[in-house]
Image (spheres, helix red, strand yellow):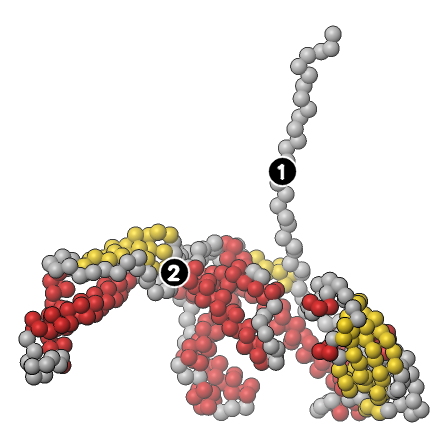
Amino acid sequence: MQSEIREISPVLVEVTVEVPWDRIQKDLNDTYKELGKTARVRGFRPGKVPRDVVRQMYGRQVAAQVTGTLVEQGLMEAVQKHELHIVAQPEMEEAPELQKGKPLTFKAKVEVRPKIEQVAIDELEAWQKPIDIPDAEVDAEIERMQHQHAEIQVPDPMRPAQEGDLITIDYTVSVDGEPKEDLGAEGRQVEINDEHLLPALKEGLLGMQPGDEKIVEVAFEDDHPNETLQGKTAVFSITAKELHEKLLPELDDEFAKDCGDYETLLELRLKIREDLEASAKQRADAELKDQLIDSLIEHNDIPVPPSMVQQQQQMMMYEMAQFMQLAGQQGAPGADFFSGIEGRAKRRVQAGILLGSLARQENIEVTDADLDEKFQEIAERTGKHIAKVRADHQEAQRDALQSQLLEEKVMALLTARAKINEGERPEPQEEVEDVEEEAPAEDEGEDS
């Protein structure tokens, strides 16, 4: 078979393949020979059907089968011969047909990975803020834990509801005088300092006692997620059923012991700070990675195959659907997710191609020793025996772990080679077009 390629774009080539007639004839004869062994034709014993009869009865079927096989083999040989890194199934404009005595010629368009001669990484730049956990964040976490360990009781004597209380209410909702049954509830317990509570509703609940009834009007913004409430004022008819108060524990060493294996409140505070710093570092590392990838793409503007972008979009939508399912959410992702999804998918594809090319360029690879070290780390973190961890990482799981480790090595190289500035990343400046001021027109003549 003969083949040649024509580059249409850096990510699309046209492959032309020509199969000589002698190759076609051989495949036809071989196919007829095999078919003759099993063909059943009335008047002939199995395996004794004459070739002409087989050709007459199965000619079109054999021609189509041989053509399909030759097209597949021809494209495969062309891909190997020209070292094409294809990313999608070839597309043929029209199906070729066999003509006796003539070669079979066909063309197909194939999407390929862009050829990258050199990945530029010497001028990458990123910014990273120093990790600083203020005392207020530690105090806020202590307060959250304090509320978790609070005792819940009915006020004695009963009193009006106040900030921090838990009040159980029945309520109905109407909009423009029309009851909205789906928005009402019975026996709902509300924490009055709940940050998600509507301010007008919170204000209305303060001061209520069991048995009290109150009408509260709540105005909603024009962009409220619930279309029936956008720009509307809803009327809440509320009946207070129960009231409970929280008794917060004293912040002392006993409280620390109740929160875990801590002997003193200071020890608890130190552990909280340590955890907050670890979380902050994880976020900072993720942000630094994003910046480095942005800089990598900026310095290596490569085209990407459209099919890879489409596949990445589908994968992102699938990941979002899985996340929503795990979170117990129903329906489709919001409009914010779909806004710019093609751009985000393109960025992921560009990043994947560049990181893979950089790994080959710098001879970065994952060794068996790297995998063993990772298996040991997983075993220590999960409490599993290392043999069990190895058994859990077969084929796809092992490939995924190798990809993760390879990416970590490449990102470590980028971090070492890039210029990392301390502080906030500056906002990109908008380009302002220079506008030349028109000079005032000169008088063509003087007044006489």
The residue pinned by badge 1 equals: 434
Does residue 139 appear in the picture of this structure? no
- Residue 139: x, y in percent? 78, 77
Assign a secondary structure to mark 1: loop
> Residue at the location (38% across, 54% down)?
10
* As drawn, 73 above or below 430: below
- Residue 321: x, y in percent? 55, 74
* As drawn, 233 above or below 446: below
Q: Which mark is residue 113?
A: 2
Foreground residue among 191 and 381: 191
> Residue at the location (71% across, 78% down)?
182
Foreground residue among 73 and 123: 73
**Position of residue 176 in the picture relative to residue 42 (left or right):** right
**Position of residue 80 in the picture relative to residue 296 (left or right):** left
Foreground residue among 267 and 320: 320
Measure the C-alpha gap from mark 2 to mark 1. 39 Å
Quadrant, the N terminus: bottom left
Assign a secondary structure to mark 2: loop
> Residue at the location (78% across, 87% down)?
187
* As drawn, 109 above or below 233: above
Question: Which of the 4 image quarters holds residue 158?
Answer: bottom right
Question: Which of the 4 image quarters holds residue 170?
Answer: bottom right
Q: Amino acid at mark 1?
A: Asp
- Residue 19: x, y in percent? 18, 60
